[in-house]
Amino acid sequence: MREMMRKVKILIATVVLILILSSVLPSVALHASQGELQEAAAEAQAEAAQSGESVGAAGKGEGNESVGILVIAHGSPRETWCEPVREVVRSVASELPYPVELGFLEFVPNETINIAVDRLNEHNVTKIVAVPLFISSHSGHIEEIKYVLRLRETPPASEMLTFVEGKPVRRSVLAVEGKCIIRREYLTPALTVKHTEEEELVPVNTTAEIILTNALDNSSLLAQTLAENAAELISDAENETVVFASHGTFNASYLEEWIADHESLAEQIKLILRHRKGIPIEDVRFGFIHLPVVDNKTMHPELGLRAVVENVSVNSTPVVVANMVSVGFFTKKYIPMLLENLTYKYNGSKALCPHENMVKWVEISANREISTFVLQIYDYDGETLLNITIEEVGEYHGEICPCVASAFRATQLAFSEFESIPVRGDIKVICAHPSKGHKQTFEYIFGGENLRIELPAGTDIVNLSVENYAYTFIQKSSGHEVRVEAREDIFPERFFDLRKKCKTGTATSEEKKAFKYAKEDLKSAFLYLPEARVFAFSSAFIFDTGEPANPYPSISGVHKGAIIPASNISVSKMLIYPCVGTGGHAEFVKIYDETGSVVAVGNWDGYRAGDWRIIEFEEPFTLFANETYFYEIRTGSYPQIHHKKALNATGGWINCTSFVDANNRKHDDWIPAFKLF
């Protein structure tokens, strides 16, 4: 115990010496800121896909562009620091359709930025999107990364005092004999040099265009992660204050940006805790471990971590969370050391990685740079190919809001499932959302006559749920139906409650602000998260007569006729469309082929729980394209009727050879309205 106390005292004395010396050696980083038409359409789409052009799928590169993703992290000699970062990158690589590599700035010689770029070169990438997994864009480390990525010509120069594995180190970046060197001088407690390590910063060798995104800064996903980590520690919210701890900066020229980002983060965290998680936290503050020293005076000393925690402790219990990329010396030892003898809550084994939000942040950061939002659709003439962008739709609506983003992205997904470029007038859209943004998006793309709004039970323009973010796209000529539904977990917590309060005028000013942030989060998710994270979908071919404009007169009876499907259709159910306010249904259905062999039989189960309009066939079966089949359907009550002898339906053709009604009258122009799926 005595030996442990002796080591702690030496460590504290070393820290004090470093803080004093840092006032003498401040950072000096330098920086610079149908038929032939369908065949032709399919051929055009295939050619576009081979050339890499976007044909209605977000995130694909334009033209002959080949994209690679480079995630950059600082690095550490400790595997326990590096592995959570690798875990994040592995998750990103499993979800994005591009090669993804990880490069560390220093300490990890087998996983450098240069090695990562070499691996991307092996994929013949023409564009590299580099995502720095750092707390701030306002950092000398970012300037070092720019130099390595050839985004600045001159090497940066800097000097700072820090710790490596708990040992005091003077870290310098300097030019030596035409090379850019990171020099680490390990210091004794007396701050004399014990030994020195050097690493060269070498510009990457690639012909690919390189784009460097921003670091985490004041990202909403960062705020959400810190809020979640804090929520685990909060037990008496009204008497507790969250204090998130960040490294800070030695460089005076960066400090104002750090403060601005952290003020934004503090506001977001407070709103998330109070209005998404229902935790009435007293306040949220931030504190820095490092602050610049100018003329022997510390800038903004009141923002030092210990000073903030002391100030909070007067009237509240501090809940400290680490705003650091991974767990290491600073989270486990340095923060507790700085806060020695203070009362606070803290978990030093919790940092940002490998939180799922860091995966999402990398994906969104990368996709912002490479996503394309273009839809290809033929105009009504079937010859004029249109390229519709989300910007055009946004201008038509007035903004790109979450509704526009969801509707457009869902349409891209549906188009990617169709076997040919669709034609206006041949696509029917059923949307479960009544908003103007949804309506105008689909009107702009398809025309208003092809849109139908069908609200789920219990929902309206004020009372919405995730069920309203559901869309059905039907290619009438082929019977191809694509159903797209937004996943529940992309919606911010309490999103619909906040929306309802804002719509009804009962929201407080803070709730309005919380909803504004939530809308932006949802919009970003719809636009930039991988498709599989955003939507669930199903794709199948159907046969659907649709509902007639005038379904009357109607009566029960026995219908017979022929069906010719346009595509192969897998069938297990039949739905009869009833006249409004009636129990119109089918009691029996039989389908047989040209030889008279029975293909399928189905019987009605009565007005049972569930959808009584549906008959389930005894066995699933397939109707094959362009083959002729015959149907016999016995109906009850009042089904909807197409009063035609023949009808071009969605997914094929149907006629009526005879209908004998319940009064034994015979007709040859009564086709029941139904759907096979």
Image (cartoon, rainbow, N blue to C red):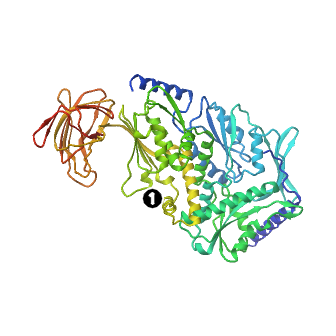
Residue 486 in view (yes/no): yes
Q: Is residue 552 above or below residue 422?
A: below
Residue at the disc numbered 1 = 462
Left or right relative to 520: residue 415: left
Left or right relative to 220: residue 44: left
Instruction: Locate residue 287: give its quadrant.
Output: bottom right
Question: Which one is in front, 241 or 199?
Answer: 241
Quarter of the figure with the N terminus: bottom right
| Residue at 71%, 74% in the rendered image | 342
| Residue at 89%, 59% in the rendered image | 24
- Pick out the residue farthest to the top: 36
Q: Is residue 375 above or below residue 521?
A: above
Q: Secondary structure at mark 1?
A: loop
Q: x, y (%) of residue 488?
A: 46, 53
Quarter of the figure with the C terminus: top left
Q: x, y (%) of residue 127?
A: 65, 35
| Residue at 53%, 50% in the rendered image | 402
Q: x, y (%) of residue 669?
A: 20, 34
Identity, as a three-letter code, of the amino acid under mark 1: Val
